[in-house]
Image (tube, grey):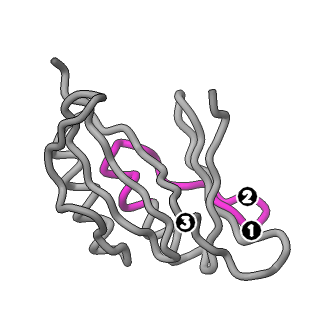
Amino acid sequence: MFSHVMVGANDLEVSRKFYDAILGTLGIAPGVINRDVRYFYRTPTGVFAFSLPVDNKAATLANGGTIGFAAQSSEQVDAFHAAALANGGITCEDPPGYREGPAGKLYLAYVRDPIGNKICAMLRVPK
């Protein structure tokens, strides 16, 4: 459904360090800079990017928005969370752990990136 997801950034180096660290825990290669204003993280299943805003105004976060990254194990989710905290992220919602709901059992970790975007790592637990 999606070709890519892009969020704004106010400091490319701060965001690169943060996203290289957290996405690296999920096996995603470091970001590649494009035109000196954005970084791309390409995978066979999609692309994530961050960019300085093209209008030269400050990047702002999406109130109510969340970007979720698929994890292959609860250990990856925990590593994602730890890497986020070690690289300028802030934990939000509940601590990493299992949650159950209509979608089944999930193992989740929610954090905010350096400008406040809400992101998570999620493992769908097989039934």
Front label number (3 vs 2): 3
> SS of the residue at dot 2?
strand
Q: Which mark is residue 63?
A: 3
Provide the secondary structure element on which disc 1 rests: loop
Question: In whole angstroms, how far apart are the C-alphas of marks 3 and 1?
Answer: 27 Å
At x 68% / y 65%, what residue is drawn? 51
Q: Nearer the viewer, residue 45 or 118?
A: 118
**Marking on residue 36:** 1
Q: Residue 13's spot in the image, x, y percent?
A: 55, 76
Residue indicated by mark 2: 34
Tell me if residue 88 comes above or below residue 20 in the rendering.
below
Q: Is residue 2 magenta?
A: no
Measured as percent of width and height from the top left, residue 52 is found at: 71, 71
- First along the sequence among labels 3 and 1: 1
View extreme (right): residue? 55
Instruction: Inspect the image, locate mark 3, and give the three-letter code of the amino acid beneath it.
Output: Asn
Q: CA distance from mark 3 to mark 2?
A: 27 Å
Q: Crowdedness of circle 3 by 10 Å Cα count: few (<14), some, many (20+)?
A: few
The image position of residue 85, as x and y in percent, is 28, 72
Residue found 75% across the figure and 70% down from its top: 53
Three-letter amino acid code at the position of disc 1? Asp
Q: CA distance from mark 1 to mark 2?
A: 5 Å
Q: Which residues are magenta?
A: 20-39
